[in-house]
Amino acid sequence: MSPDTVTLALSKGRIFDETLPLLRAAGIEVLEDPQTSRKLILPTNRPDVRVVLVRATDVPTYVEHGGADLGVCGKDTLIEHDAAWGGAARAGLYRPLDLGIARCRMSVAVPADFDYARAVRQGARLRVATKYVAIAREFFASKGVHVDLIKLYGSMELAPLTGLADAIVDLVSTGNTLKANRLVEVERIMDISSQLVVRPTALKVQGARIRPIIDAFREAVRARGA
Ligand code: AMP
């Protein structure tokens, strides 16, 4: 990685789209559209700033290990990343700012005909399918509910419909996906939004380039909230 270039890791979709206005506020325009370009490294109007497109769950890894200097990822991704490495927040990832973008919530959902409250009251052992194993484990442990966690990588909504699980833990935004699959939200575990992550050593070496970007993001987030 060139010490003269700042690399920002983003994932395609909501995070990319909602980060663009923040970049603009920092005077940075991405010069290619990931919808039409097949490139994974996107140039910007600044020769010293580029964007790399990575899978959402890879953003913390890219930033921590130097494939990118800073990145944007969901709080869910960060919690699961920390848990995969022992639970504590990773020293190699500085988290200076909650960007308040890609907002959604992490929830428990069950089939409409499943009496979740009763199952919990009776101390039943629940089979819970999720991609977010650390968040689910911590949540049910804090409630004293016994669960068998079933790790999935794809559509979780399918699990209760096929008898694989009693419940799912997933991200919910509009609730349309749940509704379309006759699932109902029974617990709201936490609110999720995307965070800015930076590698501390990059900040040390490239501070003159990275700090103004963080400051512009912070100001844009503040102005939007005002
Ligand atoms: P919705 O139908 O709007 O409730 O969206 C739910 C689907 O979109 C689920 O499959 C979620 O995994 C996914 N989803 C919703 N919001 C986000 C987000 N902020 N980041 C990643 N995935 C999301």
Image: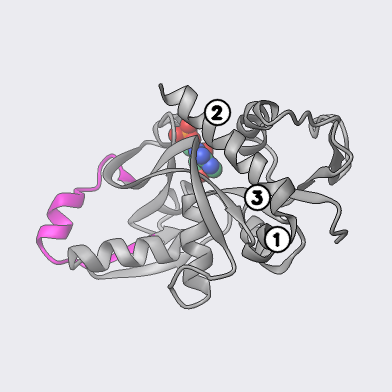
Q: Quadrant of the N terminus?
A: bottom right
Q: Is residue 178 left or right of residue 117?
A: right
Could you say where residue 22 lies in the image, as x and y percent from the top left?
62, 31
Q: In the image, what residue type sits under mark 1?
A: Ala
Q: Is residue 112 left or right of residue 66?
A: left
Q: Is residue 28 left or right of residue 70?
A: right
Is 59 above or below relative to 27?
below
Range covered by the magenta-colored residues: 110-128
The number of numbered badges drawn on the structure is: 3
Camera-side residue of 192 and 137: 192
Camera-side residue of 116 and 214: 214
Residue 177, visible in the rendered structure: no
Q: Is mark 1 within 8 Å of ligand 1?
A: no
SS at circle 3: strand
Q: Marks 2 and 3: CB-CB under 8 Å?
A: no
Image point 32% across, 44% down: which residue?
Answer: 111
Residue 141, visible in the rendered structure: yes
Tell us which disc is closer to us: 2 or 3: 2
Which residue is the site of mark 1? 202
Image point 68% across, 60% down: which residue?
Answer: 63
SS at circle 2: helix
Which residue is the site of mark 3? 71
Closer to the chain start, of discs 1 and 2, is 1
